Structures are given as C-alpha cells and as structure tokens.
Amino acid sequence: MNTPTQKKSRPAPPPGRPRTGARVAAIQALFQSDQSGESAETVIDQFVRHRLGPDGGGFEDGRVPTVDVPLFTHVVRGVARQAETLDEIIGGHLAREWTVARLDPVLRALLRAAAFEFSSGSEPPARVVINEYMDIAHGFFGGEEPRFANGVLDALARHLRGAEFQR
C-alpha cells in the first residue's frame, strides 16, 4: 500500500489510449536512462524489444501493452537531444531554492517529457498535454507531487505556448 508520499509502482494507462501509454513508457525510459547512464537509443531499443506491446504480459509484468511507438521514440529522443535546454526552461519555473537536479527523478522525467512536447509543436493542444501528464503523475505519485507537477506544467505551457491561453 502506498503512503501519501510514496511513488506508486506502475501507472497503467486506460485501455485503448496508446498516446498515454507512449508517455508513460517515455517517462520510464527517461528515468532508466537518467539512472543508468545508458543512451536514449539503448533504452529505446530495450523498451521496444522487451517492454512495449501486449506480448508477454501486461503492466503488472513490467510491460506497457498499448503504445504509440512513434510518439514514445519521438519524446525520448527529443528529451535526450534537448535535455540541457529543457532543464533551463524547467528550472526557470521552479522556486529559487529548487533545481532540476533536486527533483525526484520520475518527476524530472515527467517534466522534461512534457516540456519537450510543449516546445516541439502545437499539437496536441497544451491543455491536452497537461491533462495527459497529470493523469500519469497521479499514477506515479500518491502525495503532493501531482499538485507540484500541475503548477509547473501550467507555467511551462503558458511560457512555451502562451498564445493558446489568450483565446
């Protein structure tokens, strides 16, 4: 059982939501790359071979059964290429005493993935990106982290896609 501040084990995206599955898998892959030092390409290969798709079990078996693989690879590669820039942007929306390095590694991966999506185009709309990553944050965390993530995601979206919020 999770206490309010513990991470939950594996958030399962609702069935039939491959884009959500791609984002969950991207956060897991970014976390793995960050913690292990493995390249994004190595981790992408491991995920595609062993953790994505319905073969061999479901979420309880460490797999993400329904995944938009092109979105997954796009996010992981994009974050890897732009990590320094994304961290500067994210850092600019944290309290002065906080740094990106000080963030929980899963939360850091989530914010990087969302910041990359905000900065890489206008689709999907920023509010959709926020909702997707908030659903995922609630799957990973049982404490105050989702509220923190919501504030940072909103600030990032308004910074990177301000025109969408002026309508």
Image (cartoon, rainbow, N blue to C red):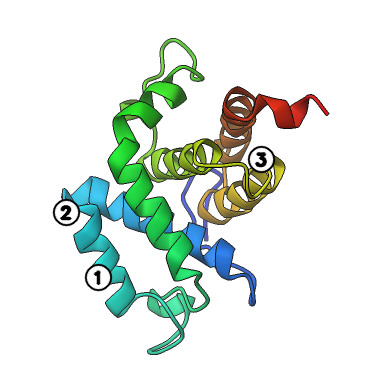
Q: Residues within 10 Å of mark 2 (few under 14, many from 20)?
A: few
Quadrant assignment for the C terminus = top right
Up-down: is 107 above or below 135?
Answer: above
Q: Is residue 25 visible?
A: no
> Residue at image x 63%, y 35%?
150
Q: Earlier in the sequence, mark 1 or mark 3?
A: 1
Name the residue type under label 2. Answer: Glu
Between circles 1 and 3, the one closer to the viewer is 3
Between circles 2 and 3, the one closer to the viewer is 3
- Are the two marked residues, 1 and 2, in contact with CB atoms closer than 8 angstroms? yes
Query: Is 120 situated left or right of 55 in this image?
Result: right
Residue at which label 3 appears: 126
Q: Earlier in the sequence, mark 2 or mark 3?
A: 2
Residue at which label 2 appears: 38
The secondary structure type at the circle numbered 3 is helix
Say the numbered circle drawn on residue 149.
none
> Residue at image x 53%, y 63%?
11
Q: CA distance from mark 1 to mark 3?
A: 30 Å
Name the residue type under label 1. Answer: Gln
> Residue at image x 37%, y 46%?
78
Residue at which label 1 appears: 46
Name the outermost residue toward the right. 167
Name the outermost residue toward the front. 121
Up-down: is 64 above or below 75?
Answer: below
Name the residue type under label 3. Answer: Ala
Q: Earlier in the sequence, mark 1 or mark 2?
A: 2
Q: CA distance from mark 1 to mark 2?
A: 11 Å
